[in-house]
Image (cartoon, rainbow, N blue to C red):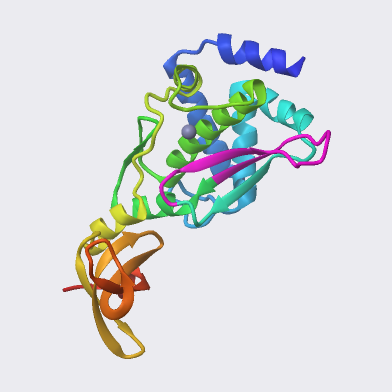
Amino acid sequence: MIARSLTELINRRQRSLKQTQAIQRSIYDFVLRNSPNLKTGQFQKISNADLGMLFQITDEQIFDGLLGQLCERSSDRPLSFRLSTRMTTCGGMTTMQRESRRGALPEFEIAIATSPLFDTFKVDTAAKVGGLVCHNRLQALQRIMEHEMLHLAELLLFSDSNCSGSQFKRYARRHFGHTESNHRLLTPSDFAKKKLGIAIGDTVCFEVGGKSMTGIINRITKRATVLVADSKGTKYTDGKRYSKFYVPLNMLRRK
Ligand SMILES: [Zn+2]
């Protein structure tokens, strides 16, 4: 019954872009008024509970609360929200997990990546998410949550979800005005390049136990992977031997 109502709503509801934007703005204002952490659009801290609040108010305003209700009916556990410090390239991720015991209902989780959200606005004044220009963290977070809510809706209704599919794109445009399925927030390597001027392939110096080392950046996530030439190290595809170091980005200097 709830599934049918949500299917009907998600396929049929029509709003003008202006109406959608007014709703999104009212959700933005609601969160700032009610969250203990999010006091300005460029918030400095956030909790799992803030994600829950944003989900709930968006669900009420856009889907008449049906998404949350359907999720509750379809799962053994309440929908969970998580802030991820480890996800660095995607803005968010919605997962459906089923325990192996027979008759178990699936469990759903929405995870939001914190580092793209926080890092981007340390160096930039705007970034596109879902094709829409966002001027601060809360706007970007809203667009990411909207995207993940559509993943959740597709998972609940069709047991599968794909944001490069035409159905997803249609829903994203219809309900949230999104014109793209990706985000242009900064990944750690974008951030390292903009903020510190370092990039993969650069020769860098760093210190280990008072000893100065020189190596080449091989990878950038939360830390940089630096390869230092070492006759006792592992052989790499270029035929040379290296030792691998994981170095916090702020401890690197360009050579
Ligand atoms: Zn997606």
Q: Is residue 42 above or below residue 144?
A: below
Residue 231 is left or right of residue 156, and the answer is: left
For the point 64% across and 14% down, the residue is 7
The segment highlighted magenta reads 88-111
Q: Is residue 45 above or below residue 10?
A: below
Percent x, y for residue 66?
69, 23
Percent x, y for residue 50?
60, 47
Percent x, y for residue 137?
43, 46
**Image quadrant assignment for residue 152:** top right
Percent x, y for residue 235?
30, 69
Between residue 5 and residue 156, name the one nearer to us.
156
For the point 44% across and 44% down, the residue is 90
Residue 98 falls inside the magenta stretch: yes
Q: How many marks?
A: 0
Residue 88 is left or right of residue 93, and the answer is: left
For the point 52% across and 57% down, the residue is 45
**Image quadrant assignment for residue 122:** bottom left
